[in-house]
Image: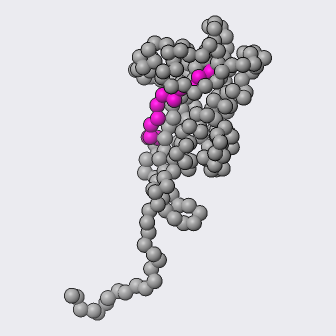
Amino acid sequence: MARYAAIAATSTALAGLIRDRYPRAAFGPSLDVALYQASDFEKPMEEGFSLYLYRIAPNGSVRNLSYRRDPDGRRFRPSLPLDLAYLVTPWARDAEKQQRMLGWVMRFIEDVGVLSASQLNDYVSDPDVFRASEALDIICEPLSMQDYLTLWDRLHHRIPTSATYLMRMLMIESDVAIDEAGLVQTRRFGVGEPVA
């Protein structure tokens, strides 16, 4: 159960892993790796990888979660399960290099498969965004033609060949405690007492 900073931490971790591990001998020592907003597609980088978080949705398979309990036994509102959808785009001056970069990043993300809490916490200033037992699945999820055209229109037709990925089951925990009454000390049944 991650805290509210988990969305930003997830994006930063994915960008950081790509930045740390891309093959410098094949692509050069100074590729940019950046998190993009829609406006960044107007003037994109010359060479590198961009990650664009284009959709966040509640996870459809897990919706009725029970209350969360902390180690002291206090109850909190249920966690919010989210799926994060990313557009990973390689940018290069020529098409051949861009396609080699796309092949590498798709193979790299497939090899990673699951981001552990240590990987997710490694790239942010607060090392406790994710608990040690947490992890996120990352899977390639191609867009439907309708979603692709919607994204194409939103980015003003400036989107080169890209890959889309889904980070599943990011659980954002609530800080809202559920008040409970004190422990029961005595119990009265009222058997044989007159009804008032």
- Taking the image as drawn, is residue 44 in sight? yes
- 120 versus 94 height, above or below: below
Along the line of sight, the residue nearer the viewer: 168 or 127: 127
**Residue 187, position as x, y percentages in the image:** 40, 85
**Residue 133, position as x, y percentages in the image:** 64, 50
Residue at the (45%, 83%) spot, across then down: 185
The chief SS type of the magenta part is strand
Residue at the (66%, 37%) spot, across then down: 123
Residue 14 shown left or right of residue 20 in the figure: left
Q: Is residue 50 magenta?
A: yes
Residue 59 shown left or right of residue 17 in the figure: left
- 35 versus 127 height, above or below: above
Question: In the rendered image, which quarter contains the C terminus?
Answer: bottom left
Q: Which residues are magenta?
A: 49-60
**Residue 97, position as x, y percentages in the image:** 67, 10
Q: Is residue 6 magenta?
A: no
- Taking the image as drawn, is residue 67 in sight? no
Q: Residue furthest right?
A: 25
